[in-house]
Image (cartoon, rainbow, N blue to C red):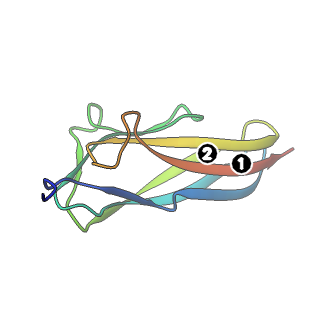
Amino acid sequence: MEEAPMGRIEVTPRKADLGSLRVGDVGHQTFTIKNVGTAPLTIQRIYSKKNPAVLFDEKRDGGPLVISPGEGRPFELEVRAEKPGRLIDLVFIRCDARNSPEKGYKVVAIADIRQ
């Protein structure tokens, strides 16, 4: 039996190391969301767990982000280093992809923050 056409999400990098940051610095990482499925991929929301940032929201930004099969779109995560230590941030991508869990597809960003 053949699968019904659906979007499938792939994000690169899946884990990003922002390196060493000083308190007060802002780290940046560009991720690429690619649709490796056979139907359009619809993204409703991209948000950071640690940062209060919402990188994309269909209600705020005038509708969902739709990525055609075989296409990719970049998005940038900005992380502000607030206190010394190890930073681990989870970015969730809410979408209709076949391979996305209910909470969203997860991407990880890490950094070492020093004084």
Q: What amino acid does circle 1 point to?
A: Asp
As helix, strand or loop, the secondary structure at mark 1 comes to: loop
Q: Is 44 on the left-hand or right-hand side of 115?
A: left
**From the viewer's perspective, is the residue at label 2 or at label 1 nearer?**
2
According to the picture, the residue beneath numbered tag 1 turns out to be: 25
Q: Is 96 on the left-hand or right-hand side of 56?
A: left
Query: 67 above or below 81?
Result: below
Which quarter of the rendering shows the N terminus? bottom left
Q: Is 110 on the left-hand or right-hand side of 34?
A: right
Judged from this view, the residue extending furthest toward the front is 1
Depth check: give the residue in front, 79 or 96.
96
Query: 79 above or below 38?
Result: above
Q: In which quarter of the view is residue 9 placed?
A: bottom left
Q: How many marks?
A: 2
As helix, strand or loop, the secondary structure at mark 2 comes to: strand
Q: Residue at x 26, y 31 (%)?
A: 59
Which quarter of the rendering shows the C terminus? top right
Judged from this view, the residue extending furthest toward the bottom is 70
Label 2: few (<14), some or many (≥20) within 10 Å? many
- Please provide percent x and percent y for residue 53: 50, 35
- How much space separates mark 2 and mark 1, taking CA atoms? 8 Å
Q: In which quarter of the view is residue 100 placed?
A: top left
Depth check: give the residue in front, 2 or 5.
2
According to the picture, the residue beneath numbered tag 2 turns out to be: 79
Q: What amino acid does circle 2 point to?
A: Val
Nearer the N terminus, badge 2 or badge 1? 1
- Please provide percent x and percent y for residue 93: 40, 43
Label 1: few (<14), some or many (≥20) within 10 Å? some
Q: Residue at x 29, y 55 (%)?
A: 8
